[in-house]
Image (cartoon, rainbow, N blue to C red):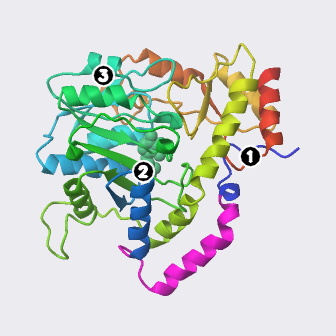
Amino acid sequence: MKNISYLSLKAINAPYEKAIAEALIKVVDSGWYLRGRCVSMFENEWASYCDAGYCVGCGNGLDALRLVLMAWKNARLLEQGDEVIVPANTFIATVLAVSESGLTPVLTDPDPDTGLLTVSAIEEMVSSRTRVILPVHLYGQLCDMESIMSYASAHSLLVLEDCAQCHGINHIMSRSAVKIPAGHHACAWSFYPGKNLGALGDAGAVTTDSKSLADEVRALSNYGSAEKYVNDVKGLNSRMDELQAAVLSLKLADLNRCNGRRIDIAHRYLDEVVNPKIMLPHISTASVFHIFPVRCDQRDELQAFLDSRGIQTQIHYPIPPHKQQAYPEWHGCRLPVTEAIACTELSLPCNQAMTDDEVTRVIEALNDF
Ligand SMILES: *Cc1c(COP(=O)(O)O)cnc(C)c1O
């Protein structure tokens, strides 16, 4: 029997291979490789898909987060050392973006059921230096943005959403109706190859309803320059290239179908996995299932058992940021929920390249454990 890989990028991209080849040749022939037509076309498409006023392409998801924080610093909405509330159980990039920007990440233990940042956890960590809430829509599941936006509005906080795992979520659940000033709110996206919408390399974007924030992010992503050779602020070189934009535009047209397939697979897992040793995820809002996370006290045994059945799994994430060598200052922190998740989480294969038979094999193996 063929092994079931956790995520085969080759299989994910195979349906588009011909279209990708044609699109790439067009870019080569155009002789224009940066800040061109493909990027502005994808930016328009992504803004409209996300129901946002503006989209600015950039180099990757980490930079998308950094660029927004830099723009807020330049606009004097943030100062060196201001505190940013981040969930403690996230991919390291969320935290790096904050510390790299000279701000202070305040690691917050998530809700034990969903693994997401909640207002009650925020309330416990908030201080007089808190300026930003940085929710992460982890695993593809939307945080309760209604309550987070209400809280931010009541306390005049900025909101930066880490959307690296939730492409298309607004197509299955409407966004919060609560508004904060447009310039105080942005979403950061990653199009890393393994994301629900993935490029053939690194790419990222910022979406926002604020023209001035979008303009500032664009200038910052291009050396801090809105006009060639004129540098108003100190910026980065973090641009989406034409090749990636061309690939993203053609894959975007198929994103809702791909997410639909992920959701169907996830619902089979939720309905058909009936093993008391395996805790299924609790979906309180809606999810595009970038990751299907189960929890199991004998996680390592379960992973080895699935591996012996030819089923590859992953752990998101085995070492939380506060336990990393990169952040020795946090080694004394106690974040029990985050630590429990790191010890028990196992991610099942859940993507559009899987066949129904493969899904059945995963379910049978889980029930046999
Ligand atoms: C992937 C990811 C990022 C970083 O994106 P890159 O494009 O790899 O820099 C940030 N946050 C989360 C939650 C991610 O999953």
Magenta stretch, residue numbers: 13-36
- Identity, as a three-letter code, of the amino acid under mark 3: Ile
Name which quarter of the figure residue 78 lies in. Answer: top left
The answer to whether residue 26 is magenta is yes
- Name the mark nearer the viewer: 2 or 1: 2
- Label the magenta part by its dominant secondary structure: helix
Q: CA distance from mark 2 to mark 1?
A: 26 Å
Q: CA distance from mark 3 to mark 2?
A: 26 Å
Q: Secondary structure at mark 1?
A: loop
Q: CA distance from mark 1 to mark 3?
A: 38 Å
Q: Which image quadrant: the N terminus? A: top right
Q: Is residue 241 above or below residue 156?
A: below
Measured as percent of width and height from the top left, residue 125 is found at 27, 20
Disc 2 marks which residue?
50
Q: Secondary structure at mark 3?
A: helix
For label 1, being within 8 Å of ligand 1 is answered no
- Identity, as a three-letter code, of the amino acid under mark 1: Met
The answer to whether residue 295 is magenta is no
Q: Earlier in the sequence, mark 1 or mark 3?
A: 3
Disc 3 marks which residue?
122
Considering every residue shown, the one lying at the far top of the view is: 276
- Identity, as a three-letter code, of the amino acid under mark 2: Cys
**Disc on res. 354:** 1
Q: Which image quadrant: the C terminus? A: top right
